[in-house]
Image (tube, rainbow, N blue to C red):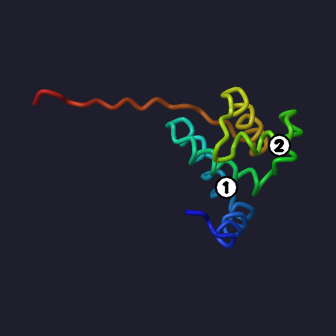
Amino acid sequence: MALTHQFKETVQKRIETDPEFRLSLLTEAINCLIQGEFPIGKAILRDYINATIGFKELGTLTHKSSKSLMRMLSDTGNPQAKNLLEIIAQLQKIEGIEFEVQIHQYFTVSGE
């Protein structure tokens, strides 16, 4: 199901005016990528970039063409880990934040 233009505009306005929402969106994108939900993570990351820095500026910072970055994060894109992590590193710098991985171990009881 494709998102409507009005919905995308609403999300973009909220990203611009609500820093907590903006950071939550970036966090969700990264969580999706880490958990193997690549299509969702890429889509959220693409929306985040479009509503914040833009692909042209991100291309300048990563020394990659904006078209190449857009292809990486497209529905059919398959970015290398190096490129994806470089994008995330630049977005962290721009936001003035640092993500940290936490381990959550889940135990299951068997044989009861």
**Going 63% across and 51% down the picture, which residue do you hit?**
44
**Going 87% across and 33% down the picture, which residue do you hit?**
63
The answer to whether residue 19 is above or below residue 59 is: below
* Marker disc for residue 31: none
Picture quarter with the C terminus:
top left
Count neighbours of disc 1 (C-alpha within 10 A) and say few if under 14, some if 14 to 19, many if 20 or more.
Answer: many
Which residue is the extreme one toward the front? 76
The answer to whether residue 47 is above or below residue 66 is: below
Whether pointer 1 and pointer 2 mark residues with C-beta atoms closer than 8 Å, the reply is no
x, y percent for residue 57 = 87, 46
For the residue pair 47 and 93, the one nearer the viewer reads as: 47
Q: Please state which amino acid type lies under the numbered disc 2.
A: Leu
Q: How many marks?
A: 2
Judged left or right of residue 40, residue 105 is left
Judged left or right of residue 108, residue 87 is right
x, y percent for residue 16 = 75, 62
For disc 2, the marked residue is 58
**Going 70% across and 37% down the picture, which residue do you hit?**
88
x, y percent for residue 20 = 64, 56
Picture quarter with the N terminus:
bottom right
For disc 1, the marked residue is 22
Q: Please state which amino acid type lies under the numbered disc 1.
A: Arg
Which residue is the extreme one toward the left? 112
Residue 42, image quadrant: top right
For the residue pair 77 and 107, the one nearer the viewer reads as: 77
Which callout, 1 or 2, points at the residue further toward the start of the chain?
1
